[in-house]
Image (tube, grey):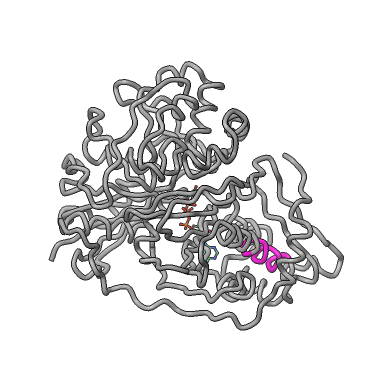
Amino acid sequence: MSLVAGVDSSTQSCKIVIRDADSGELVRTGRAPHPNGTEVHPDRWWEALRKAVDDAGGLHDVAALSVGGQQHGMIALDASGEVVREALLWNDTRSAQAATDLIGELGEQEWADAIGSVPVASLTVSKLRWLRDAEPENAARTHAVALPHDWLTWKLAGGKGFDGLVTDRSDASGTGYWSPASEGYRHDLLERGLGHSALLPRVLGAHEQAGTGSGELFGGLLGPGAGDNAAAALALALGPGDVAVSIGTSGVVSAIADAPTADGSGLVTGFADATGRYLPLACTLNAARVLDWAAQLLGVDHRGLAELALQAPSGADGLVLVPYFEGERTPNRPRSTAALHGMRLSNTTPAHIARAAVEALLCSLADGIDALRAAGVPVQRAFLIGGAAQSAAVQQLAPGILGLDVLVPTPGEYVADGAARQAAWVLSGRDAQPEWSASGEPRVLPVRELTPQVREQYAQVRELTAER
Ligand SMILES: Nc1ncnc2c1ncn2[C@@H]1O[C@H](COP(=O)(O)OP(=O)(O)O)[C@@H](O)[C@H]1O
Ligand SMILES: O=C(CO)[C@@H](O)[C@H](O)COP(=O)(O)O
């Protein structure tokens, strides 16, 4: 029996799954937390990976490993491979003005045609422009630019020299200087951001080997890895009409497409997937943490929050939360704040507030699904994944608000699973992906009653927020 490992280095934690390479059967798992904040030294991610590996009982018997990770994070490396400054994460919005400047120079549709997406604060190219303008000395020292999953794969291989710095097309497509349509880097756009050229990771094919581990933490075969959403799509084996709805720190709706998208409105980012196809996606900054906020405010745990939310009526008697606590990316409102509308003495009970929080989260994801449809992506059913997908209230309200049958796969780490599946693919040396039979059938939650009034009252107040 050969074993493979998949890593999810996500915003809040590092998770690892170890599975049988042939059947996909789960053998063991591990996890470790990441520090809070939107500016993190990559060494903290390496430390968390080491702890997660320990927690999983080590990698001594693992033949191949791939890393999936949070997308877009800017890791600037100097000529000797040292990190120039803390990485700026996908949800750091200080680069909002830089994104606006980049759009002003080229135009929305021109960016979408060039790289599949219109720059927002999250994209790496906007963060590099911020670095150029705010920290010119750090920009000048930047010799190479990597993403979180590229850097961790490189560290596993020993972290020496730049020949081993590799990435895959899914994560490259979230940088803002790689074109899914032409499958190549746009060095001109990198230079437009950073102000000078820099070395970029080599983009590997979907199941191409990325070398071997150095032996310090892992000595087996390394896969190319993937952006987290592409890794989850690999694990779910999404088909036409399927949408993955991921509720982690980010709220993401994504689908597999056979052709690249170029949405000049900026609502849908036209990324690549981890199999050679495409992954149109809409991503919000406010998802699981909206429920974390509500639970903390009301002094309950997540089970208690779900119970409260299910006690209140649909629409929370007109109490509507606009959940832009962290600013927002989709729609692009980086300076926005959250707002609670329609407050009356009678509808501000804990149950109403809990209900408004869950409805706000689902309405913002439903807006993302509308944007996918408007970009020509067929949408028929939704797979619910990510930490907050386990909320009973989210599960119960999702079909009515999303207007779709919802499938809840067996609780698990779908990003890490997708990375493990990629590792098995690399290990097999075959062109076809491994057929894994081990994952159980998802639970189907059919649409019983549509609740369009919840989305209508949300749409009425969605624009009414103060700037930070
Ligand atoms: N039962 C639950 N109900 C609501 N939220 C939950 C539940 N379980 C976990 N979460 C939340 O999910 C988030 C972690 O999900 P995860 O997908 O791992 O995030 P990320 O990928 O961004 O690190 C946390 O904010 C956590 O509080
Ligand atoms: O920015 C995006 C997608 O474009 C996010 O999906 C990040 O990749 C972070 O994901 P989580 O850690 O929240 O799952």
Percent across and percent down for residue 389 are 51, 67
Q: Nearer the viewer, residue 414 or 262?
A: 262
Camera sees residue 173: yes
Write down the region rendered in magenta.
353-362
Percent across and percent down for residue 135 are 52, 20
Percent across and percent down for residue 231 are 36, 56
Q: Residue at x 33, y 40 (%)?
A: 150
Percent across and percent down for residue 220 are 16, 49
**Split into 4 quadrants, where in the image is the N terminus?**
bottom left
Q: Is residue 440 left or right of residue 394?
A: left
Residue closest to the far right: 345
Corner quadrant of residue 23: bottom left
Q: Residue at x 37, y 53 (%)?
A: 8
Up/down of 426 relative to 237, above or below: above
Q: Nearer the viewer, residue 299 or 340?
A: 340
Q: Nearer the viewer, residue 296 or 167?
A: 167
Up/down of 300 relative to 140, above or below: below
Camera sees residue 92: no
Question: Is 75 in the magenta?
Answer: no
Q: Is residue 205 left or right of residue 87?
A: left
Q: Residue at x 31, y 20 (%)?
A: 79
